[in-house]
Image (cartoon, rainbow, N blue to C red):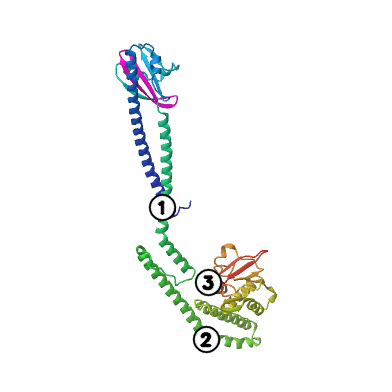
Amino acid sequence: MRRAGLRTRVSAAFAVGALALSVCVTVVSYELTRSTLFRERERTAVRATYFDAALVDASLKGGATNVADVLGSLDAGGDRYVMVQRAGRWYSRTADTDAHAAVPAQLQEMAAGGEAAAQRIRRDGVPALVIAVPLDADTVFYEIVAQRELERTLQVLALVLAAVAIMMAAGGAAVGWYVTRHALRPLGAVADAARGIADGDLETRLDPETEPDLAALAASFNHMADELDRRMRRDRRFAADVSHELRSPLQTLAAAVSVVDRRKDGLDERSAAAVGLIVAEVNRFQELVGDLLELARSDQPVSREPTDIVALAERVVRAHGLDPAIVEGDDPGEWRVDARRVEQALGNLIENAVRYGGGPTAVRVGKGFLEVDDAGPGVPEELRASIFDRFVRGPAAGARGAGDGTGLGLAIVAEHAAAHGGSASVGERPGGGARFRVELP
């Protein structure tokens, strides 16, 4: 399972932290508000009940005999239900004779003992408060106060607090994303610089002043880049020096071998075969030295000049003994490129197609690209990334010293494309074979 990125983990941590904090605040706020509202509501209900009880007591002591009429004279409202228990009999202001069933037995016992009390109940699914006020030895006034509005208020409050908690969690995630975006920006610059060096731009460096906290990292990165640049320059110079020193003795050896080769008809069969092998290897050695020298010079700046790319492609095709009619594509106009390098890159692709791809089937010229199709077996997908490495030969990727080529032709193509700021790639040609593509911005 793939691990989430640092930015995602930090954002999730901010979101979880904000959610946990908001939940705690929400629960505490809800409970405090709920208890406060209940206390205020109960205090108001108790005051109203005592006031109603005083009116009923005054009416009964004043000679009123019809308890129901006395209760009907009270302004109880829709949320209050009043009852009187007198001499074991229940009286109410409505025809609801079962209302007394909602009064808990414990509360009745306390009221019968002469003690005023109150108790929370649920009546018909609605929270309510029952208050008992003794009037005399055998008379108790009861009032049931429904708290429907209070419950609705608490439900709305719970929804609002839950929404606030969700918004705080989302805000925490947004803050985490914003913070990590800015905190990781210097690391992004390091990644971009490393990518630039990997792509061949050895001049890429980091500015230690941009992010003081990463000054040590920037200095180490720049030192690494300097050492890498210095080592690559030294390796190129060494390859160039060795190749240059080999050219003179090779030319002498080639001249001597050519003399022997011209007279091999007078030699016996084995000696003639040996001379032929020597000639082939000397020629291959010369080609290898030339390619090494070309690679050693590939880091030099390109010399751009207006170039008729179609005429260049036809010239290269004709130089390889092929029909210029295989050059396809619309006229892309003049390109500003290094004609020598482009000519060599295209020549290497054509030669590669001749040697390993059954010959080129088309040379395509488009806006900013060159393509060479061949009729060979193609390049397996797993080898396409390494086919442009040095000393790699097609399907025999990784094999060194085999075949009649140097293994540097496609590497030179990639170097010349990179020198122009472009790239070289290989894909599958429709209908079979390989399609090599060079992009030159």
- Please, what is the three-letter code of the amino acid marked with disc 3? Gly
Earlier residue among tags 3 and 2: 2
Residue toward you, 413 or 65: 65
Q: Does 134 lie within the magenta span?
A: yes
Examine the image and state in which quarter residue 285 appears.
Answer: bottom right
Q: Does 412 lie within the magenta span?
A: no
Q: Is residue 395 visible?
A: no
Residue toward you, 421 or 250: 421
Q: Is residue 155 visible?
A: yes
- Please, what is the three-letter code of the amino acid marked with disc 1? Gly
> Which segment is the magenta one?
122-145
Crowding around mark 2 (Cα neighbors within 10 Å: few <14, some 14 to 19, many 20+) is: few
Q: Which mark is residue 421?
A: 3
Q: Which residue is mark 2?
A: 248
Tally of marks: 3
SS assignment at label 2: helix
Residue toward you, 189 or 40: 40
Q: Which residue is mark 1?
A: 176
Q: Return the x and y of residue 311 as percentages of the image width and height.
A: 65, 78
Per the model, the C-alpha gap separating discs 1 and 3 is 38 Å
Kindly report which numbered mark, 1 or 2, lies closer to the viewer in this rendering: 1
Q: Return the x and y of residue 306 as percentages of the image width and height.
A: 58, 79
Residue toward you, 164 or 51: 51
Crowding around mark 3 (Cα neighbors within 10 Å: few <14, some 14 to 19, many 20+) is: some
| Residue at (63, 83) in percent of width and height | 272
Earlier residue among tags 1 and 3: 1
SS assignment at label 1: helix
Per the model, the C-alpha gap separating discs 3 and 2 is 34 Å
Earlier residue among tags 1 and 2: 1
Examine the image and state in which quarter residue 225 appears.
Answer: bottom left
